[in-house]
Image (tube, rainbow, N blue to C red):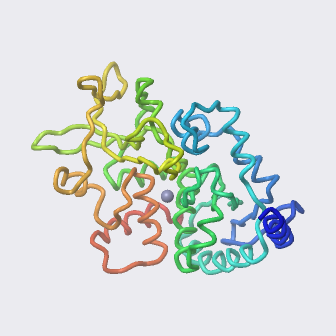
Amino acid sequence: MRVLFLALSLIFTSCNAQNNSGPVNAQLTSRTQIIFADSILAAKIISTEDTYLKAVSAYDRSAIMQLATPVTQEVFIRHLKRNVLNWPENEIKKFSAFAKKIGPRLDALNINLPKEIILIKTTAGDIGGADAPYTRQNAIMFSRPTLDKTPDSIMANILVHEIAHVYSRHNKDKRTELYNIFGFRPSYTIKLPKEWDDRRISNPDAPLLNTIMDVQKEGKSITVTPLIYARNPVYDPSKGGGVFQSFTFQLMQVEEKEGKWQAVFMDGNPVLLSPSPKTLPDFWRQIGKNTNYIINPEEIMASNFQLLVNKKSGLPNPEIIEKMEKIISEK
Ligand SMILES: [Zn+2]
């Protein structure tokens, strides 16, 4: 077993095109390049104390490291740094071809992207073994399991979706306008008491509780914020799944007190509402029905951005795409 493992790891190393010889580029749009980070650049980006790293909760750290015990921020960052890889040549070629295909569509929108979008390959240890691409800063993270099992046609779409997150982070005013389409508006970051803050799950694409919306419930207007959290506050390493092990999405009711939005608590727990179309039809009236990926306005926006870039027809709410195009297009 040991010998076989060694042989396999040698093959893997020899396939490694970059070998820390520096990042490789591909043109995306006329103004934006894709940079394939080598593991040195990747480790630097993934360990940068950005909004996500400042927001991670106790549960995030334990679930990502697949431990039932608490993990310090220092150990967590070291773990992230250890789980980045170099890009092999075949994957660089594949993503360069995606860039060639997608680039002209983004150029046609005249979209304001950063000069560089960095692609990082990870082992999946950075997300507790799960298969879930995500973004931080101007970088997009793809894990080995995602790269190994995703067909090319789907992968090109995932790349478009992730570019939407990089765009939104790079254009904060436009982000607010885009969120407005779906009924959301910005708020100061809503703080939770420790017991609930510890079980919060941070989506790196939108790590803060800082968007709210008014929604009609049984004839009454209430204000809510999307919350993702762990149903079981202690991670069970025997079950796996990383942050998705007991991932729960609900709308948390908030109220304004002394100029600040705060969670409404009842009997020691926040008031949580199911986002189902049956119980909360007004939520769906506002976010539209083009996508089912609705865990926060950032994901609703990115999913609709995919439809915009792909010029998808026959949508339930085509007006959303038209409004998005008007906001994004710098013509
Ligand atoms: Zn996303």
Q: Residue lying furthest front in this view?
A: 1
Where the N terminus falls, by quadrant? bottom right
> Residue placed at 75% from the left, 53% from the top?
42
Name the residue rendered at 70%, 43% in the picture: 79
In this rendering, the answer to whether 283 lies above or below 142 is: above
Q: Residue at x 42, y 55 (%)?
A: 178
Image height of 159 relative to 271, above or below: below
Residue 24 lies in what quarter of the image? bottom right
Front in this rendered view, residue 254 or 62? 62
Left or right of residue 312: residue 162: right
Residue 320, position in %: x, y? 34, 65
Q: Residue furthest left?
A: 219
Q: What residue lies at 29% left-to-right and 39% top-to-bottom?
A: 224
Residue 293 horizontal side relative to residue 1, left or right: left
Residue 113: horizontal and vertical position, in percent? 62, 60
x and y percent of residue 214 in the render?
A: 25, 42
In front: 158, or 27? 158
Could you tell me if residue 265 is visible in this image? yes
In screen coordinates, is 164 left or right of 14?
A: left
x, y percentage for residue 180?
36, 51
| Extreme residue in the right direction | 21
Between 67 and 182, the one lying in front of the other is 67
